[in-house]
Each structure stands twice: as structure tokens, then as C-alpha cells.
Image (tube, grey):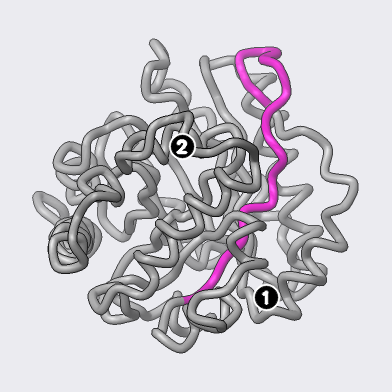
Amino acid sequence: MLERVRKGNGFIAALDQSGGSTPKALAGYGIEEGAWSDDHGMFALIHAMRSRIIKSTCFTGEKVLGAILFERTMDGTVDGRPVPAALIEKGVVPFIKIDKGLEDEADGVQLMKPMPELDALLDKAKALGVFGTKERSVINSANPAGIAAIVAQQFEIGHQVLAKGMMPILEPEIAIKSATRAECDTLMKAEILKHLENLSGEMQVMLKLSLPVVPGTFDALVDHPRVLKVVALSGGYSRPEACAELAKNRGIIASFSRALLEDLRHQMSDDEFSGALAAAIDEIHAGSTRKVGVIA
């Protein structure tokens, strides 16, 4: 799976909406709040959507390198097969979202909440064949102290993941609405580079970053020997906008969630659903692999 991620020609699907974002994801899918009576019913509906995606004939390792799962999705099945195993059979590398939400903003950032049961989750995920993890925190403004703290926390958790023999995707997201996005890009990159130099042995991490204001800003991270892959979140852009920005950045592939799912509806026939998903996959794959205005 390491070589698949290192050398593969595609993108990573983010199928990891958690409890707080699930109602919004279901609404986008055409299922309004009130269609379920409790959390169990809500998660059953979102699992059915994800299962439909995973089972689609167009959702394969040909263009989808990996998929990030919510813990409940990882624990579920697709046609009787554990979800990670079903993905692996299709050539898609499974990852698991491990963060438990965000702290209140301080120093312009929102750190991750504590994860006291992380070791147990990592052991369970690894036993199911999951390759790596993803952890999200948010940068809202260009506060040097806050950005230093958020990157330090990302690497601290990343070391815990690496100690379990898994690959961490570090995600210090920069909010698309930040008035100081470009400065945030520069400060965050500098902090990440500091921590990369402190990785020992053959350690590598992956990075999931907001698309930079200035294309090419993250080239030093793309080229760094301690970085297996840099992936980008859509971060509020529509899919066409996100793919256009992505195509301007050498070596960065997509890890989109909403932008992947935005045209899918519960009411679609299987043929309509597969057609809409295939079109989204093709567009995101193109943005990930066909770069414009950059030197390869």
C-alpha cells in the first residue's frame, strides 16, 4: 500500500464525515433531517450512501488511490465484507479519520480535542488492514504562536501513529475565508519544514493542506524526502473551482469530500448515480494528474 500511494496515479476520496457534519452531508445527498429518528438511523443512511459509492463500478484503484473513512464506516461492511477489505479488493488504500473534533479557537487556531483512546483505535484499524490515518485541525488567522502550536500538535499525534506502524496524514487546514490566507500558507509551511527535519530514520508523513493562495507555495513540501504525498482538501470551493486550483499545483493530488459527492443524490437510479460519480472522479483525477502552467 505504501508503494501504491507513492507511485499511484490518482487521488484520495474523503468519505469521513463525522457526527457533526453528517446531517449536512445527507441533506446534500437529498435526505433531509427528519428522515431518521436517532443517531443509529442517521449513520445507517450515511453508511448506505458510502456503500453505494464503494460498490460503484467506477470507484476503483484505477483513479482512486485511497479512501478516508469515519470510524463507524470502518467498522461496517459492504456486501458482507469489512469496508477496509472491500476497498483493498478494489485497489483502494484505506485510511481512518482519528480526530475527535476541535477545541475552541485560541491564538487564531483550533487545536484537536484530546484523543485518550487513540492507541486502541489505531490497533483496531491496523487489524482491519487500514494503512493510515487522518487528523484535522484548523488555522483561522496568521498568528505565529497559534500556527506553531497547531503544527506541533499535528506532528505529536503523527509520531503516535508512526509508532503503530501506520501512515499519518497531517491536516492543519487553513480556512478558505481567512483574511490572511497567504500569510498563513507561508507561516505553516515554515513550521512544517522545521518538524520534517526532526523526523528520524526513514520516517515519512503525508500532508493534507488547503490549496494555497499562490500556486507552487508548497513545492518544498512536495519535494521533501520526509513527505510521502501532499494532498489537498477542497475547503469550500466548488468541484470545478477546486480542480482548477489543484491543477496549478505541481505534485499535489486531491483528497476531496464534498466536492466529490456534490452531484450525487439518493433519488438517482443506479445508472444515474454511477454516471454522476464517474464524472466527478474523472474531473478530480484530471486536476490531480494533469497540471497546467507548472513545470513537472
* Residue sitting at x 48%, y 84%: 3
Is 141 left or right of 29, judged from the image as shown? Answer: right
Spatial distance from mark 1 to mark 2, Cα to Cα? 49 Å
Is 158 left or right of 272, judged from the image as shown? Answer: right
Nearest to the observer: residue 229 or residue 264: 264
Q: Quadrant of the C terminus?
A: bottom left
Main secondary structure of the magenta stretch: loop
Q: Secondary structure at mark 1?
A: loop
Is 40 situated above or below 22? below
Image position, residue 92 (x, y; %)? 43, 77
Q: Which tag is nearer the camera, tag 1 or tag 2? A: 2
The furthest residue to the left: 293
Nearest to the observer: residue 155 or residue 223: 155
On whether residue 103 falls in the magenta region, the answer is: yes
Is 164 left or right of 273, judged from the image as shown? Answer: right
Image position, residue 5 (x, y; %)? 45, 75
Q: Label 2 amino acid?
A: Ala
Q: Which residue is mark 1?
A: 202
Is 243 situated above or below 79? above
- Which range of residues does the magenta coloring cover? 93-110
* Residue sitting at x 48%, y 51%: 46
Q: Quadrant of the rendered structure where residue 160 is?
A: bottom right
Residue count near mark 2 (Cα–Cα under 10 Å), binned few <14, some 14–19, many ≥20: few
Q: Which residue is mark 2?
A: 35
Q: If you read the primary sequence from the N terminus, does the residue marked by circle 1 or circle 2 appear first? A: 2
* Residue sitting at x 51%, y 58%: 47
Nearest to the observer: residue 41 or residue 125: 41
Label number found at residue 219: none
Q: Quadrant of the rendered structure where residue 18 is?
A: top right
